[in-house]
Image: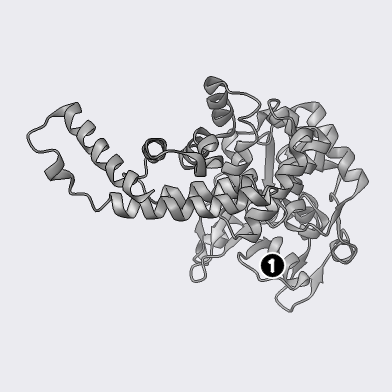
Amino acid sequence: MKIYLVGGAVRDQIMGLSVKDKDYVVVGSTSEEMVKLGYKPVGKDFPVFLHPKTHHEYALARTERKISKGYKGFKVYASKEVTLEEDLKRRDLTINAIAKDTRGQFFDPFHGIQDIKNKVLRHVSSAFVEDPIRVLRIARFSARFHQFKIHPKTEAILKQIVKNKEIEAVASERIWHELFVGFSEKKSYLMLEVLHKCGALKLLLPEMNYVKHKHSIKKSFEYAFKSKHSPEIKAALFFMYLYPLKGNSKLQEEIYTRLSVPNAVKKLTEKTIMNLSDLKQFKKLKPRQILDLIYKMDLFRNPDMLLDVMKIFEAYISSQSTQLRTASTTLKSLKKYLKYLNKLNLSSIGQNKRGLDIKDAIYEARLQVLTKLI
């Protein structure tokens, strides 16, 4: 039995990057032997085990054979006879198909180390075309390793996968996972560029006119990364560019369902887009309009949403310097107003009143406070 460190951990070590997760491949062993050694089985589709102490993943060397359409249409074969090279051959990119043994020696049958030096994203074998999820993986790798270029032959295969429409068989949860990981990268817009060039973006989001918004999306994502915004903020920011095209709430919900977008991201997008016009012209709003804005944003019950909505708003208008100054002033003003409005004794205002009368009395009391502040 021989054990090798594989995949992203080896790649990142070679590139001088910090290693987050370590995965190992085990050659010349069986599931029974792994269990006897104390490893805990966790794999459903193929034999994967957790180390009894480190809890790192150890997978038996395996091969895969395409038997049906879709990213799940593979038959996995794992046995003592499967070699390390056979296991590495089923991987997506050459830079991810490098192994390292316990003595620190590299095993690189597909010249991944050279591709790292040349900054090239290249597929390992012709089997690359069989897995549609690799279109999304290559796209997000382009966002992470933005200095790298996709090899022309690999680009051609991406287009072929899209043409075959196998990407339509990928589960929406998996599509969202790959997109969300891409949103966390420094050059997120490059992920969208790759998906656009190979035709996948049009297939996944036919409602989006990427070319029309290309420059704005790039500016917004650059601003969001510079400001260290979360992937959730960047995801909501992405959906902001869909809304101006289609004001149909039913269609918007279809898009969310198609991509399995989490409720938190949907909520942030909705709150920002619904109040976009008022946020842009905040200085011109009268006290009643400002109070209505606070109600629509639900800031009395959920004050923490203010900061996230303003982050999205700022990134969305980042190409407009005058609007950015307005955004900063708006945030300070809304924080100030909320501070004073939250000091109101609501229980005393609602005395001897019921139902809608209480709500109206509270609203009027808050409006009086705002009128004095502005």
Seen at 88% across and 67% down, the residue is 117
Q: Nearer the viewer, residue 313 or 344?
A: 344
Instruction: Give the left or right position of residue 295, taking residue 259 as reference.
Output: left
Q: Nearer the viewer, residue 203 or 231?
A: 231
Query: Where is residue 190 drawn, in percent x and y?
Result: 76, 48
Seen at 82% across and 28% down, the residue is 163
Could you tell me which secondary element the residue under label 1 belongs to? strand
| Residue furthest to the bottom | 103
Q: Is residue 135 above or below residue 34?
A: above
Seen at 71% across and 26% down, the residue is 206
| Residue furthest to the left | 352
Q: Is residue 329 above or below residue 207?
A: below
Q: Would residue 78 be seen by someone viewing this image from the given angle?
A: no
Instruction: Give the left or right position of residue 323, taking residue 287 as reference.
Output: right
**Disc 1 residue type?**
Leu
Q: Look at mark 1 in the image and give the residue it sits on.
A: 5
Seen at 70% across and 40% down, the residue is 133
Q: Nearer the viewer, residue 122 or 358?
A: 358
Q: Would residue 108 be seen by someone viewing this image from the given angle?
A: yes
Instruction: Give the left or right position of residue 17, taking residue 180 as reference.
Output: right
Query: Where is residue 111 drawn, in percent x and y?
Result: 88, 61
Query: Where is residue 146 drawn, in percent x and y?
Result: 79, 57
Quadrant including the N terminus: bottom right
Image label count: 1
Task: Tell me if mark 1 has few (under 14), some (14-19) or many (20+) residues whose alpha carbon lies within 10 angstroms of its own.
Answer: many
| Residue furthest to the right | 152
Q: Nearer the viewer, residue 270 or 51?
A: 270
By what rule are the colours in the image chosen?
Answer: one colour
Query: Where is residue 3 drawn, in percent x and y?
Result: 67, 68
